[in-house]
Image: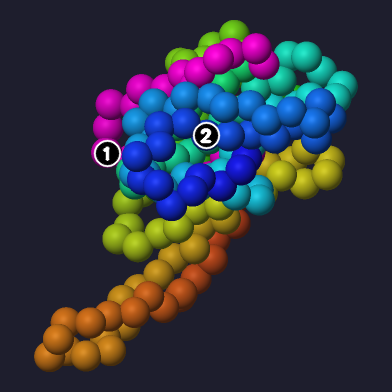
Amino acid sequence: MIPPANDASETHCKFFSILENKLYKLELPKVQGKLLRGSSYGWLVLSSNPTTSKEYMVMAIYGVVSDLAFCKNGDKKWTLIQQNDQHINHDIISHKGKFYVLRNDGGLWVGDRTSLPNMTQLVPSLPRTILNYFSLVRTMSGEFFMVRKIHELEPISRIDHIYSYKTIDFVVYKLDHHQGELK
């Protein structure tokens, strides 16, 4: 992806194909004035290698509230994934043509070419604590782990009510795909 110019009025994203030496311009709904982010090197994640599969897709986390959108090979625009709750998408990884989306409540959702824009909750939300950050890790052998970073607020100035985050613990869970649970 070509990073957008400082022009907040843009409503599209540009992607450069090294293989085709071609620039693509795709409309991304609600991108105007938003921050694009995601995992693994920035803004988006591929479902498969475009040089070996014509069935590839791209998924992006974008915007202030971390919305999700995807685009299949050949699409002219992005498709939004509607989420009707208050949870924030923290991370995306892909494996064997499926996208795994980890949310700020620890819930893990999965979707593929046939199910999107609908996603299925693979792992339910974890018990709520105040300050968590979650990341997904996939090993070379295909195992999935979720890393939960637990913070607490540490006062810097009690008078001005200024605090910093202090990491107090990490918890690592292994995903059991068959049971749909973390161990």
Q: Nearer the viewer, residue 98 or 69?
A: 69
In the image, is 168 to the left or to the right of 178?
left
Rendered location of residue 96, percent (x, y): 75, 25
Rendered-image quadrant of the N terminus = top right
Mark carried by residue 13: 2
- Reply above or below: 111 against 3: above
Q: Is residue 10 magenta?
A: no
Q: How many marks?
A: 2
Q: Nearer the viewer, residue 95 or 18?
A: 18
Range covered by the magenta-colored residues: 73-93
Q: Secondary structure at mark 1?
A: loop
Rendered location of residue 144, percent (x, y): 68, 42
Furthest toward the top, the residue is 114
Instruction: Inspect the image, locate mark 1, and give the three-letter code of the amino acid beneath it.
Output: Gln
Q: Quadrant of residue 76?
A: top right
Rendered location of residue 58, percent (x, y): 62, 28
| Mark nearer the N terminus (2 vs 1) | 2
Would you say residue 28 is visible in this rendering? yes
Label 2 to label 1: alpha-carbon separation: 26 Å
In the image, is 183 to the left or to the right of 18?
left
Instruction: Inspect the image, locate mark 2, and give the three-letter code of the amino acid beneath it.
Output: Cys
The residue located at (35%, 31%) in the rendering is 30
Q: Quadrant of residue 80?
A: top left
Q: Tell me the crowding category of disc 1: few under 14, some 14 to 19, or many 20 or more residues within 10 angstroms, Cα based.
A: few
Q: Main secondary structure of the magenta part?
A: loop
Q: Secondary structure at mark 2?
A: strand
Rendered location of residue 27, percent (x, y): 47, 24
Mark carried by residue 86: 1
The residue located at (39%, 26%) in the rendering is 29
The residue located at (40%, 37%) in the rendering is 10
